[in-house]
Image: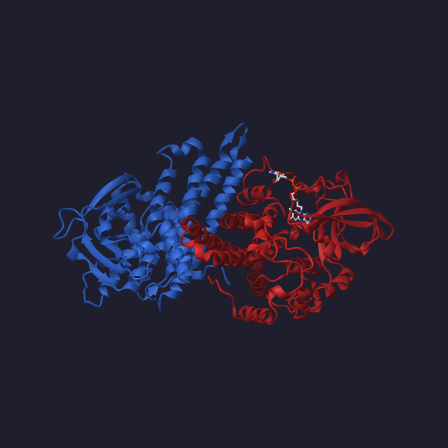
Amino acid sequence: MDFALNDDQEQLVRAVARWVDRRWPAADPSSVPGRRAAWAELAANGWTGLLTPSSLAVLDAALVVETLAHGRCSLPVGPGGMIAPLVAAIIGLDADGRHNGPRADDGTDQLLCVVDGRDPAAAATTVARGLELADRVVVLAATAPPGTAASGWSLAGRQWWTAEVAAAGDEGWPGPAIEVAQDEGRTMLCRLAAPVPAGAWHRLDPAPGELAWLAGAVLGAAELVGLARAVLDSCVAYAGQRVQGGRPIGGHQAIQHRLADMLGAVERARYLTYAAAVDLAEAAPGFHPGQVVPSVHRAKALAARDCVAAIRSGHQVMGAIAYSAEHELHHLHKQAVVVASEHGDATRHWAALETAAAAR
Amino acid sequence: MEFGYPPSAQRLRADVQAFLAERPPETWPHDAMDGGYGTGAYSFEFLRALGARGWIGLTWPSRWGGAGRPMIDQLALMEELALAGAPFGPLAGSDQWAQSLIREGNPTLQADLLPRIAAGEALAWQGYSEPDAGSDLLALTTRARRDGDEYRIDGHKIWSSEAGACTHGMVLARTTGVEEAGSRAGGLTMFVVPNDAPGLTLRPIVSLTGEVYHYEAFLDDVRVPAWRIMGRENEGFRELLKGLDRDRFWGRFCKPPALARQLSLLRRHVAADLAGQPAMARRLVELEAEVDATRLLFHRFGWLLDQGIPTPYESALYKTMADELGQRVANLALDLLGSDILLDGPGAPLGGAMRQLYLTSVGQTIAGGTSEVLRTTVATRGLGLPRNDAPPAGARGRHP
Ligand SMILES: Cc1cc2nc3c(=O)[nH]c(=O)nc-3n(C[C@H](O)[C@H](O)[C@H](O)COP(=O)(O)OP(=O)(O)OC[C@H]3O[C@@H](n4cnc5c(N)ncnc54)[C@H](O)[C@@H]3O)c2cc1C
């Protein structure tokens, strides 16, 4: 039992925190070119290459994602920066000999993916973050075996599919592949402009497909923890400064207790996420399709439920000021809402646990 | 990061399992009530059996007859007992009592008590609360005055858990007036009072479960020799605070594994009906996840304590979380079992286990510091918020 980060991880977290502190606001997060430039720096630092098919450094990856989110970075580092290259690398190693997956660790060839876990047909309607920055998009989807809907949701027996497409559109695509569904400034929601043509899908081996999806779930949990920590920090600072009735609002028990509850929710999700990262990395070498790693489902479901709730609670602490679009809170809130549903929302992860429990 | 137990603790877990397989938890006689802390009922025979295996003094230094093993082994021992539902009620409290004797006790007190604690033959109750001193413990009025080599104590304590099943009381009394001491936290002294001391009367209080749990203690000119002071005179409250983190830690460490066990009992009990109750199935997995995550927080807390890393708010936060989680599990049990949850005895669902969980869960968020007071502690000591509305200095909570 050891809850300390090792020296390399400490250094990694420090470096990422330094980067986000100095470079992220400077990189103009509200503009697409600004975000692209920041993205290229992240990739150049090697922080997007932590997951490969032969080595899933899930905890390191989670620490990077959490630290960036805590620094209010809205780049989709988990899905786009880490899972997309992982899936691309898996495609590169496909037994069919297919080798056209996008490779780009140098930041020039932006990789982003819609990771859905539902069937391929749904991929076009699923919103994802950061597609506006993409040069190429990697799509990951799964089809369920017939009859599973009735008996609950699980990963078991799913077929995994992937497709990749140039953002500007490839042959066979009607025009640009990406459309903006909602522009929230720092968090733009995009989707594929058209369904992926049937012939563009490639079957993935289920084990790496599932592993990539589960790794994405852990990174999502980590991002939610980072966002909720950021909101908690701002709320605590605000509660100490904002004076009403001659005293700081942070002296009122109603505010104090709300913040104490936020801290509890964040800590619980945080350490469970770390445990999930370690569990998944341990399970990876001999992973078999349908294998249940309970901590991964628990971490994503708890983080999706509790971190989003903590962030909502932050609005109450801030009062009207955070109702304004000029305040950062709504950005963090919206980012969390999107992350909560990527790689399985809480409902789906709870359902996976229910299915596993019923089968025991 | 490494979340598992090291080999020595793994071996101990296997030893505990073998011990419990030889004589299962339900075969030991009970001597006092299960207060719902995850440690089960008091069973003197069980406690003595643990003592005989050296498991009470597992981590004490060898000069006090301990095995000098690392704290992580003790986590493994406690967790294994809790997972099995063993009746080891006073074990954690005993160990904490012994640890504070080792830290602060004088040689006479140590020689008198440590061997008996190690054998499972001496147990302490906590005499802190009074009728008018609850959350505001420093309002206590019990007094002790020096008379030669003795102190004479007069006062009235209440809510002392399991006092009648113990051998000694840890009685907090004012030895110097507030003005002279300079603060309400000063001038208090902790006395170790034997249950058979003349002038001490214990009145049992029947709890909401129907069993005796609390006692009221009347101290009428109780005389104790000066060597029965724990720590230093007038420093009783500060010393109590020093041990507070560990007390709260051990007081709730067994709660998550016990809840894990209770959830799995419930799951098995309702398995056949669960398919038709999707809302309940959902709550079960949610609570299982919360229990797992809370257990992890306690592991981290134990690790922080073991490393000597300061824990300004963890005890208050995690205790509150564990207690409220216990109440959510109890609520699920209520929703699954309905009013049958109140039944006890042979016809009761799960042998009455859920009755005990449900009824005792209401006391958890009060005992050892209420959730309200502790949230304020988290906010002020953990988050650095101002103390405008805070309770008077030294809001409390120690036992169990
Ligand atoms: C199961 C159980 C076991 C116990 N065991 C022991 C024991 O072994 N030894 C012992 O000495 N005592 C013991 N106690 C007593 C326990 O320490 C007190 O009950 C506790 O400190 C609260 O005091 P009180 O009951 O007087 O409630 P009060 O302090 O009167 O509180 C009543 C309500 O007011 C709230 N409140 C009080 N002050 C504040 C504040 N400043 N801010 C916000 N809200 C506030 C409380 O949170 C609570 O909701 C035990 C109690 C229970 C229930």
* Letter of the chain in blue: A
Report whether residue B123 is seen.
yes
Query: Percent from the top left, x then y, of residue A341?
Result: 34, 48
Q: Residue at x 25, y 43 (%)?
A: A32
Query: Percent from the top left, x then y, of residue A120?
Result: 23, 53
A259 is higher (above) or lower (below) than B291: above
Report whether residue A10 is seen.
no
Image quadrant in which the C terminus of chain A is located:
bottom left
Q: What sort of colour scheme is used for the picture? A: by chain
Q: Which of the 4 quarters of the picture holds residue B27?
A: bottom right
B38 is higher (above) or lower (below) than B316: below
Query: Percent from the top left, x then y, of residue B261?
Result: 53, 59
Answer with left or right where residue A317 lies relative to residue A198: right
In the displayed image of the protein, which residue is found farthest to the top? A245
Question: Which of these two is toward me, A233 or A149?
Answer: A149
Answer with left or right where residue A237 lies relative to residue A150: right
In the displayed image of the protein, which residue is found farthest to the left? A171
Q: Residue at x 69, y 63 (%)?
A: B44
Q: Which of the 4 quarters of the picture holds residue B302?
A: bottom right
Question: Which of these two is toward me, A36 or B161?
Answer: B161
Answer with left or right where residue A331 lies relative to residue B117: left
* Letter of the chain in red: B
B140 is higher (above) or lower (below) than B276: above
Ligand 1 image position (quadrant) = top right
In the displayed image of the protein, which residue is found farthest to the right? B148
Question: Which of these two is toward me, A332 or A13?
Answer: A332
